[in-house]
Image (cartoon, rainbow, N blue to C red):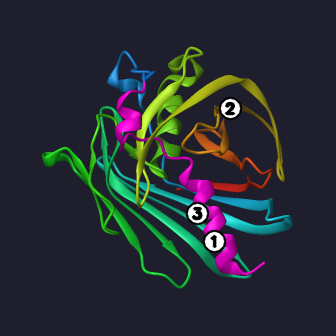
């Protein structure tokens, strides 16, 4: 399958990991936000590099490749990047950078770049309470606890790392998350730990699921395992037509 076709599909799929509010449709949405009782409940994992084996079904054709999630942090700041690759080429790259605060991650910039195309940015302008997009998309209101479509991975990891499964108590976790061109609201529903099969063996992992909505038709499944820190060991995105991408953690190195 041509790289550009795959990159377009993966971009659409991984954008579904975002959760945000940016149009009149979200203004009427009833939010279910889990707010931990103590700021100490957020504990981001140490810097890490996670390699994934990727397979899927795209446009009726099977796909295989690899991905890498790079997470770098100190006591005040973070940067994370997700790269989707095939045949040694980076087909799609997402980058998020910002601060670590009492409520977990606080993104400042998010970017998305597809092979052969210019990088697109979203800027979190907190003094003005808005999101500004470089691609000409109208500004979006910035809400408390906002994430971007990549930082949301590590924000959930930070919540689990601080309080474990008791942080959610079976309730949905809702947050604003920003893509490179839009903002939407998404909720992630936790389930009991289940067994995840990885190339290195099996692990017990907490699963978060986001069901399709009228705006986005993808079903998102995220598995987090203490290895020894909570990190996303598996990511599965399923489209309404049956297409899917499955990222399975092959190796995690903490730094």
Q: Give how far across and how far down residue 49 sits, in percent.
A: 58, 59
For image coordinates 64% across by 78% down, the residue present is: 4
Distance in Å between CA atoms under marks 2 and 1: 26 Å
Which residue has dot 3 on it?
11
User: Seen in the image, is 4 located left or right of residue 182?
Assistant: right
x and y, in percent, of residue 23 in the image:
36, 43
Q: Nearer the viewer, residue 140 or 178?
A: 140
Q: Which residue is mark 1?
A: 7
Give the mark, 2 or 3, whose residue is nearer the N terminus.
3
Q: Residues within 10 Å of mark 1 (few under 14, many from 20)?
A: many
Instruction: State if disc 1 and disc 3 touch (CB < 8 Å).
Output: yes
For the point 59% across and 59% down, the residue is: 12
Give the total of numbered labels: 3
Residue at 53% x, 45% y: name it. 153
In the rendered view, does 10 fall on the left or right side of 110? Answer: right
- For label 3, count other residues whose C-alpha is less than 10 Å away and answer few (under 14), some (14-19) or many (20+): some
Give residue 158's position: percent from left, percent from top.
Answer: 47, 36
Are the two marked residues, 2 and 1, in contact with CB atoms closer than 8 angstroms?
A: no
Instruction: State whether residue 92 is above or below residue 254.
Output: below
The numbered disc on residue 42 is none
Circle 2 sits on which residue?
207
Instruction: Residue at 71% x, 59% y: name it.
Output: 52
| Residue 1, quarter of the rendered image | bottom right
Span colored in magenta: 1-29
Disc 3 on helix, strand or loop?
Answer: helix
Q: On screen, 181 above or below 102?
A: below
For the residues labelled 2 and 3, the Cα–Cα distance comes to: 22 Å
């Amino acid at each position: 399958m041509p790289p550009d076709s795959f990159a377009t599909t993966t971009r659409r799929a991984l954008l579904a990991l975002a959760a945000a509010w940016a149009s009149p449709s979200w203004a009427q949405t009833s939010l279910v936000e889990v707010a931990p009782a103590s700021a100490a409940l957020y504990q981001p994992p140490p810097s890490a590099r996670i390699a994934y084996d990727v397979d899927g079904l795209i446009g009726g054709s099977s796909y295989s490749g690899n991905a890498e999630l790079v997470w770098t942090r100190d006591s005040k700041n973070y940067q994370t990047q997700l790269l989707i690759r095939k045949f040694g080429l980076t087909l799609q790259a997402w980058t998020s950078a910002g601060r670590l605060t009492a409520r977990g991650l606080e993104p400042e910039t998010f970017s998305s770049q597809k092979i052969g195309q210019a990088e697109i940015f979203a800027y979190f302008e907190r003094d003005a309470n808005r999101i500004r997009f470089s691609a000409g998309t109208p500004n979006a209101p910035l809400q408390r606890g906002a994430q971007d479509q990549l930082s949301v991975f590590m924000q959930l990891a930070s919540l689990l790392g601080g309080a474990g499964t008791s942080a959610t108590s079976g309730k949905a976790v809702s947050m604003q998350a920003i893509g490179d061109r839009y903002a939407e609201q998404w909720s992630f529903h936790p389930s009991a730990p289940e067994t995840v099969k990885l190339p290195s063996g099996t692990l017990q992992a907490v699963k978060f699921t986001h069901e399709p909505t009228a705006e986005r038709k993808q079903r998102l499944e995220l598995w987090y395992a203490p290895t020894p820190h909570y990190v996303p060991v598996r990511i599965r995105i399923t489209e309404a037509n049956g297409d899917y991408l499955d990222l399975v953690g092959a190796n995690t190195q903490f730094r």
